[in-house]
Amino acid sequence: MTGFIPRNPDFENRVRDSFGAQTFMCAIGATITKLEPGAVDLTMDKRVDLCQQHGFIHAGVTTAILDSAAGYAALSLFNPGEDVLTTEFKVNLLRPAEGPRFVARGRVLKPGKTLTVCRSDVFALRDGEDVLVATALLSMIAVAG
Amino acid sequence: MTGFIPRNPDFENRVRDSFGAQTFMCAIGATITKLEPGAVDLTMDKRVDLCQQHGFIHAGVTTAILDSAAGYAALSLFNPGEDVLTTEFKVNLLRPAEGPRFVARGRVLKPGKTLTVCRSDVFALRDGEDVLVATALLSMIAVAG
Amino acid sequence: MTGFIPRNPDFENRVRDSFGAQTFMCAIGATITKLEPGAVDLTMDKRVDLCQQHGFIHAGVTTAILDSAAGYAALSLFNPGEDVLTTEFKVNLLRPAEGPRFVARGRVLKPGKTLTVCRSDVFALRDGEDVLVATALLSMIAVAG
Amino acid sequence: MTGFIPRNPDFENRVRDSFGAQTFMCAIGATITKLEPGAVDLTMDKRVDLCQQHGFIHAGVTTAILDSAAGYAALSLFNPGEDVLTTEFKVNLLRPAEGPRFVARGRVLKPGKTLTVCRSDVFALRDGEDVLVATALLSMIAVAG
């Protein structure tokens, strides 16, 4: 439980509908594996077409899932009728994104009327262990949607 | 001309070989459209499978091209036998990534023995005008490669 | 000339009054040395009480002048009655902040109704040469003031 | 307990000596209130000469304590004879830095031979409650020192 009270009772459908409209999440095979107020996890499998020059997941793909996870964590707390846009993020790449499966955990740190600040971490799932490969801070803005 | 003197006379092949090994650049259709010491441009067309919920290019894709452009701008100044890894970046998304074609311009701001700091800007090419949609600062590290 | 048209004809007094109320700018001896729409420079001398362990200017002080320079560059473009707050920044420290005098150059990259994105660079003034010691991207928000 | 094993048995004196050489920490009245392997807290009182235009602590001062806290958290894990420099940081200012007393909590997220990544949070201590006012990610580099 995250402790946040959603202002939109239908937040779950709101998030799933918007996520379903992100063609890039479909293209990389990412799915929602957790959806609570202020907390969204996205999970994806490694694929050979999503890599950088050493065969690790490309930082752009890592960023895609951590950004969408954080954006939907924020959107889950917005008013009905509002949409979310990312205004900025900072990502530290801590270890090579190596592994068969990855999960991005987006969490709201500070909700706000205009700006919502999130943290988002990406873990590689290796032999039952979660290895932190990237950590990010992100700002999300609520817009009429 | 960028004013940087490459330490690797074969820097152009070094960059093209590594870029060619990034399967994700191939998957999104990005190509190198400029390659000088300390300066690399990557160009890609809009595609319907690379979008977020409003039909704009997903921030992960924008990040992918600005990160690879900056990484190869850095690699062009490295010693023979060194490879490049991104350690961190910060991206400000200034406008919706809307348009038929996008170019990421990676430039070395400060070369270094261990860390090289780059700027990278993404422009949407609209009716002959370049519209800045994202700007980033990135840190690249030289590793034995 | 910056090309920006200020919405507040009295922007110069607005900026100077607010800057004058920042006790910390007074404490470190920073002064405004350029004030145009969307562009503010702050200059300060090295002082022995503003240093880190090697005798270079502390990153907090470098950040203080680059943040205030950017904030006032943003405020110069705001409506009358609006005030400015920094929501986030990213700073790359490129070289030791060594020298007798420093200037922070805050520039608006993208003005907006709610958020204004700025770049801000700090230079050490050494023997008539400007050496870039830090570069930053910052987000500023307009608030009722 | 942080779970990190220091490589320098004398890490505590190493950190205290270096902190004592930061004249700016002395100037703002910051002191070490926790020092464990990979974890350093710095505490300071509000002072009227450290403020921005609304009478809150200036973001440069907030940054000074979160940066020094993180830097010394990193240094506590370094080898004897190594020193620490900050290469970059990103700070999100979540709430006005208002209160009688502030604590910066620097924590190592990922130690490394060259780069160490830290998180650092600043809390305002208000009526026995800790209010998060800023959160940051920072990169520290080990240098011969």
Image (cartoon, coloured by chain):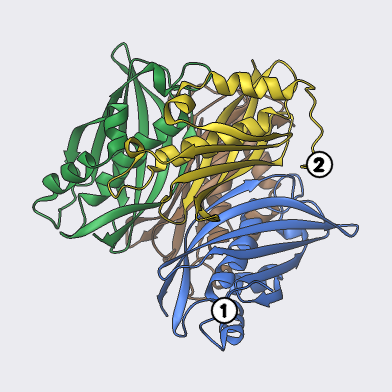
Chain colours: A brown, B blue, C yellow, D green
Residue B144 x/y as whole percent: 39, 78
Q: Is residue C21 left or right of residue A131?
A: right
- Image quarter hosting the N terminus of chain B: bottom right
Count of numbered tags: 2
Which chain is home to disc 2?
C
Q: Which residue is identified by label 2?
A: C3
Residue D144 image-quadrant placement: bottom left
Q: Could you say which disc has been placed on residue B34 in the image?
A: none
Residue projecting furthest to the top: D127
Q: Is residue C100 left or right of residue B47?
A: left
Residue A88 x/y as whole percent: 59, 43
Residue C29 x/y as whole percent: 46, 30
Residue B100 image-quadrant placement: bottom right
Q: In this orientation, which residue lies closer to the viewer: C100 or D26?
A: C100
Q: Is residue D56 above or below residue C92?
A: above
CA gap between label 1 and label 2 equals 34 Å
Q: Is residue B135 above or below residue C40?
A: below
Q: Amino acid at mark 2?
A: Gly
Which chain is home to disc 1?
B
Q: Which residue is identified by label 1?
A: B5
Q: Amino acid at mark 1?
A: Ile
Q: Is residue D124 above or below residue C138?
A: above
Secondary element type, mark 2: loop
Q: In this orientation, which residue lies closer to the viewer: C144 or C30?
A: C30
Q: Can residue A39 be seen?
A: no
| Label 1: how many Cα within 10 Å (few below 14, some 14–19, many 20+) | few
Residue D51 x/y as whole percent: 45, 21
- Image quarter hosting the C terminus of chain B: bottom left
